[in-house]
Image (cartoon, rainbow, N blue to C red):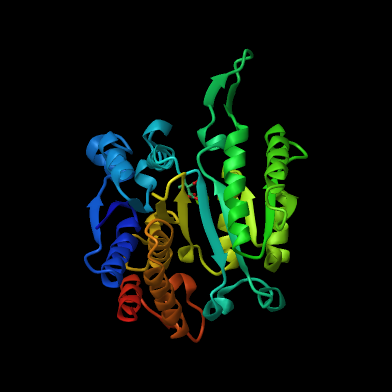
Amino acid sequence: MKKVAVIHGDGIGPEVIGATLEVLKKVAPGKFEFESVAMGGNAIDKYGVPLPDESLKICQNADATLLGAVGGPKWDNQPPELRPEKGLLGIRSGLKVFANIRPAKIFAPLASACPLRKDIAEKGIDFIIVRELTGGIYFGKHEAFTTPEGERAARDVMEYTEHEIRRIAHVAFRMAMKRRKIVTSIDKANILTVSRLWREVVEDVAKEYPEVKLNHLYVDNASMQLIRIPSEFDVIVTENTFGDILSDEASQIVGSIGMIPSASLGDDNRGLYEPIHGSAPDIAGQDKANPIGTILAGAMMLRYSFDMMKEADAIENAVDDVLKAGLRTPDIFTEGTKLITGSGMRDEIISRL
Ligand code: IPM
Ligand code: MG
């Protein structure tokens, strides 16, 4: 029996998580014990903090954690320490999941939803972003202050230690060894001292993987090349903030942010699994949310934390089949396909398992 901590979260979180739990129960009946955990805006409402100690403890003791999405306009004016996002950062650092894996792959049936020119998309798009998740500006010192002249000012510090860079680089190279053996490290080494250290350490780690080709790109150039020649990327490794930004870009390249799952891993195989999208308060409660990103995050959990490859394949194939059948939630709808609801998508996937 695998213990899975489940954070339904806010906005569309409960909808996409609900769908995913049904899928997991269908694909492996009786194999999981789910425990619901409060985190995000709902935890602020109930307990006054975004991540109660008890919630973190349950996640730390579980075999894996599954997370929907947190946040919403209701909590936007909270002080920084009491925002739902703080709970998310707390859970990422509390679980020590420093490696965030975000696959960007074009599903063949969704090729028409790709906004890129046909000749570019046709070359195939299949890359993985390995985003460093527990360092950088996100976890640096944040400060609002007043200058001696009396002007308002603020600073956020970006800091990385060598071992933080080394361990994320290893994750990327190991991943590349199982794929097309190309690592692109993305930084801003023409400006940032952190990036120069990043580059040196990544080059050092690369020596242990002589079969892997290592490229470096500046982040501004990378954002351009990702839409110019996406087929040339295999594994991207980058720091926290750059990875946050580039993974949203990647999601549009492959069709919709609603489609992309992510796995966050640490030193053992107890991961944190979530879609890369947010809580989408504008469509919450309307049965419009695409549950596929979260369902595929569930499949990643089976693959990375539980070694249940057959079941993970089954989920991914079921998703593929539904898309092949032309069924679409609003975010991936194009002319000539059939529009269905979020719960409709859930049912269609379950019926194909
Ligand atoms: C993501 C999200 C989060 C992040 C937000 C919600 C704090 O954008 O997972 O990419 O910035 O990491
Ligand atoms: Mg993001």
Query: Residue 170: where, in percent of width, then height?
Result: 60, 47
Q: Nearer the viewer, residue 325 or 252?
A: 325
Residue 16: which quarter of the image?
Answer: bottom left
Residue located at (43% from left, 58% from top):
304
Q: Nearer the viewer, residue 142 or 136?
A: 136
Residue 185 position (above or below residue 339) = above
Count the marks.
Answer: 0
Query: Residue 227: where, in percent of width, then height?
Result: 68, 64
* Residue located farthest toward the top when viewing the structure as drawn: 148
Residue located at (74% from left, 50% from top):
216
Name the image quarter holding the C terminus: bottom left
Residue located at (23% from left, 40% from top):
46
Q: Tell me if I can see residue 291 in this picture.
A: yes
Q: Nearer the viewer, residue 228 or 178?
A: 178
Name the image quarter holding the N terminus: bottom left
Q: Tell me if I can see residue 276 in this picture.
A: no
Residue 116: which quarter of the image?
Answer: bottom right
Residue 232 position (above or below residue 124) = above
Query: Residue 215: where, in percent of width, then height?
Result: 74, 53
Residue 328: which quarter of the image?
Answer: bottom left
Left or right position of 127 against 337 = right
Residue located at (78% from left, 39% from top):
190
Left or right position of 349 against 35 = right
Residue 313 position (above or below residue 235) = below
Query: Residue 5: where, in percent of width, then height?
Result: 29, 50
Q: Nearer the viewer, residue 89 or 74?
A: 89
